[in-house]
Amino acid sequence: EFRRVLFRSVSQSRYVDPDRLFIAPDGRMWFCEFKREGQKPTFAQEREHNRLRQNKVSVFVVDNVEDGKAMIDLMVMKC
């Protein structure tokens, strides 16, 4: 059975917000910050990611295609 994962851009006016919001078929949501290979989030981005995580929101930081695919597979398998 094919399951879809929807995603939306997050606010472009707040540079600390993660890049994308993903929504699984069962309604679960998680955020992803996409970086160039080897790059890390800024201090302000890390602070925002930690704030979200403290509220039980999943936030991933991905810097390559394989990790991005693994993130989606991991989260969709939880459905």
Image (cartoon, rainbow, N blue to C red):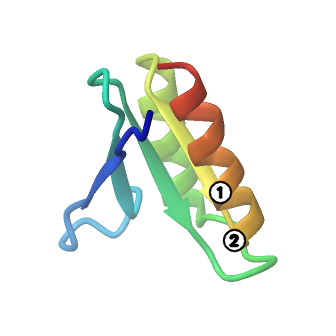
Label 1 environment density (alpha carbons within 10 Å; few <14, some 14–19, many ≥20):
few
Whether label 2 touches label 1, CB < 8 Å: yes
Q: How crowded is mark 2: few (under 14 residues within 10 Å), some or many (20 or more)?
A: few
Quadrant of the rendered structure where residue 57 is? top left
The residue that mark 1 highlights is: 69
Q: Which of these two is toward me, 35 or 17?
A: 35
Task: Give the residue at x 34% y 69%.
Answer: 15
Q: Quote the CA–CA distance across marks 2 and 1.
A: 6 Å
Q: Is residue 48 above or below residue 79?
A: below
| 62 to the left or right of 23 | right
- Read off the residue under disc 2: 65
Asked if one can make out residue 17 in the rendered structure from this viewpoint, the answer is no
**Which of these two is toward me, 68 or 2?**
2
On the image, the x and y values in percent for residue 21 come to 33, 49
Mark 1: amino acid: Lys
* Residue 14 percent location from the top left of the image: 25, 65
Query: Where 36 sits versus 27, above or below?
Result: below
The residue that appears at 67% across and 82% down in the rendered structure is 36
